[in-house]
Amino acid sequence: MIRTEAAVTPAVLSWARASVGLKLEDVAKRLKVPGDRVAGWENGTGRPSIPQAEKLAALYKRPLAVSYLPDRPKEPAPPSDFRTLPGRHDAELSPTSRLAIRKAQRLQRIAAELARDLGTARQVRLPRISLTRDPEAAASRVREDLGTSVEAQMGWADQRDALNQWRRTLERLGVLVFQIDFPVEEMRGFSLPSPTTPAIALSVHDRPAPRSFSMFHVLAHLAARATVLCDMGWRSSGPAPAPIIKTEMFCNHFAGALLVPREALLAQVSATGAAAARDSDWPDERLRELGEKFKVSREVILRRLLILGLTTQACCKRKRKEWAAAKPVKTGKRRFRSPAQISFSERGAPLVSMLTESYSQGNITYADLTDYLGVRGRQVDKVVELATRIA
């Protein structure tokens, strides 16, 4: 049998593999060929067969045509690494995380092209903040821009409802919020600034309360027009450079202050006669109750109490040590989500609405619509229906 070689560009093959975070041995194992053969394809001493080139394209999540380009295509730069937890800063991202970043960048690019084709300027009211000033004042000002009262926040059903409500609030400001599949063990969110389509990406695997916190932590970066990925670490020192740690401390403070405003928390504390609470006065049950009021985690409440001088560093250390040693609480079976629900959760109502309008105006084909939504058949109508309910 004649073996037809694919005239791929070696440097492009090497770039495609590295961009998805795979090693030569990973590729060799997947294709069931010797490692030196894969290396030969990348240094030009050999060529894959056409079927092998097709497998490489599928593995790297790239169109086959990319492998034939004379040079690597231009792509947005990846976010800067602002992770601060031990062992994370500058640690290699898994292929899943790399593909999540690429997906978010693609969704943002699609949104920008749709907005341009529709000929309507998106109303973006993203605030601008300085990460070197007072995070409490910045949070108060942004919260006022959001127009969400503490009373409304406390009236939301639960933490999942709060996550959805906060997402819609940011979407009304013109911010795209993507919820994508990537491991929270590596990162919890990242920002993608843009004049017309600023975007935030969150891990769909995070619990609702931490996800809401991550949303506003990343919003601080977005408001500072910075492209970064974060793990929301609370450390005030560590392996990351001091300026990064300082910035992350600001963003954590900002997120906590926005979700749990100072005066509102003090009012809740005073209402129970605990205004002078100290180390031993904050049992887990009380922290949980306050968290349920504001629809945040007990960790956020504890941190706010520390900032407001209502607890001590010793208490925080002890609590975190206890929580880390405790067995994880079982949250029950994971909820089944249809392809339509997954598509809508990833993209959000604004992008789905732009896609629908663009299709109705004939700017994109039905094939484009299904490609951009990532679903087919009846699921397309169901995604559109979900967006219509929000509108």
Image (cartoon, rainbow, N blue to C red):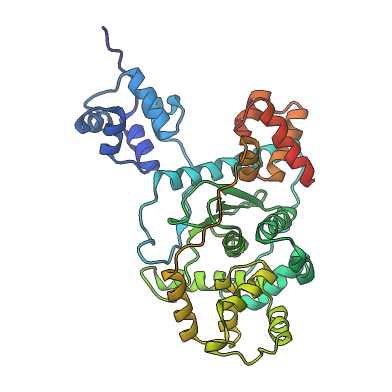
Could you tell me which quadrant the N terminus lies in?
top left
The tally of labels here is 0
Judging depth in this view, the residue of 137 and 231 nearest the camera is 231
Judging depth in this view, the residue of 307 and 340 nearest the camera is 340
The residue lying furthest to the top in this view is: 1
Could you tell me residue 88's position as x and y percent? Answer: 38, 61
Residue 129 quadrant: bottom right
In the displayed structure image, the side of residue 154 where residue 184 appears, left or right: left
Could you tell me which quadrant the C terminus lies in?
top right
Could you tell me residue 350's position as x and y percent? Answer: 71, 45
- Can see residue 374? yes
In the displayed structure image, the side of residue 157 where residue 26 appears, left or right: left
Could you tell me residue 112's position as x and y percent? Answer: 65, 42
Say which residue appears at 70% left-offset and 90% top-offset.
273
Say which residue appears at 27% left-offset and 23% top-offset.
47
Could you tell me residue 390's position as x and y percent? Answer: 77, 46
Q: Is residue 374 above or below residue 172?
A: above
Q: Is residue 239 above or below residue 98?
A: below
